[in-house]
Amino acid sequence: MSRLRLPPLYAIVDPLDTDRAPTALAAAYLAGGARLLQLRLKDAPAPTLYTTALALRAVTRAMGALLVVNDRPDVAAAVDADGVHLGQDDVPVAVARVVLGPDRFVGVSTHDLDEARAALDAGADYLGVGPIYDTTSKAAALPARGLPLLRAVRALTDRPLVAIGGIDRDTAPAVRAAGADAVAMIGALARAADPTAAVRDVIARL
Ligand code: 3NM
């Protein structure tokens, strides 16, 4: 695929423990101006993930926004998402490509330079880089890497980098200045009193 361009906010739809519906969060983020949503429902049964992804595909398409499905190339392909995001424990990039074909993008989470080099060699279209700051949103998250890892990965590649982990509206500008094309957020959006206002605020700061 031609070089991927990501919007500055990579908004992850994961309600965490908030009891908010993923579809309500998605609508709120889009209303605030988000133009990329990743659907991340770690504990959802596959039928729930699929139907939620279908619903998000409809609303993202209506807004001209990108949709990424976390972990599951099969679900991404089934709902005609724009891409998939793979963790280190998911199928390899090449397998995702077989499932998704040439026109959808594949991102990979990386946590050190070796993982970043491996993801680049495997042909990832963008890299997740983190955790930048401490986070409670991911089970068994690694210790915070700070901005040095982001700068080091930036020096390796001009492919898009998505910084993740503990980023909020206050830290987002510095993270972007350190080389991230986009900043990813879960908790800062899902836990906000007004998620639409939170997205609007972050985008204005970026
Ligand atoms: N992946 P929050 S950190 C899903 O380092 C995820 O790969 C990470 O959530 C990684 O914005 C993380 O609430 C959690 O900190 C991000």
Image: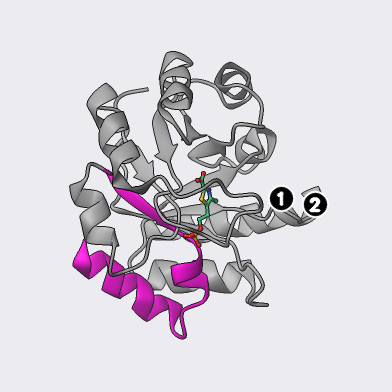
Residue at the far top: name it: 121
Residue depicted at 50% across the width and 67% down the height: 187
Residue underneath mark 2? 47
Q: Are marks 2 and 1 in contact (CB under 8 Å)?
A: yes
Q: Is residue 54 magenta?
A: no
Asked if the beta carbon under badge 2 is closer than 8 A to the nearest atom of ligand 1, the reply is: no
Name the secondary structure under disc 1. Answer: helix
Residue depicted at 53% across the width and 71% down the height: 25
> Residue 109 has which mark?
none
Name the secondary structure under disc 2. Answer: helix
Residue depicted at 54% across the width and 37% down the height: 84
User: Is residue 157 visible from the viewing direction of this image?
Assistant: no
Quadrant of the drawing holding the N terminus: top left
* Mark 1 neighbour class, 10 Å CA radius: few under 14, some 14 to 19, many 20 or more: some
Residue 201 on image: x %, y % = 28, 74
**Left or right of residue 106, residue 199 in this image:** left
| Image: magenta residue range | 180-206
Residue 148 on image: x %, y % = 29, 40
Q: Is residue 129 above or below residue 135?
A: above
Asked if the beta carbon under badge 1 is closer than 8 A to the nearest atom of ligand 1, the reply is: no
**Left or right of residue 202, residue 126 in this image:** right
Q: Is residue 189 magenta?
A: yes
Quadrant of the drawing holding the C terminus: bottom left
Residue 198 on image: x %, y % = 37, 76
Residues at marks 2 and 1, CA–CA distance in whole angstroms: 5 Å
Q: Of 36 and 9, which appears nearest the observer?
A: 9
Amino acid type at image mark 2: Pro
Q: Of 96 and 144, which appears nearest the observer?
A: 144
Residue at the far bottom: name it: 193
Residue underneath mark 1? 50
* Mark 2 neighbour class, 10 Å CA radius: few under 14, some 14 to 19, many 20 or more: few
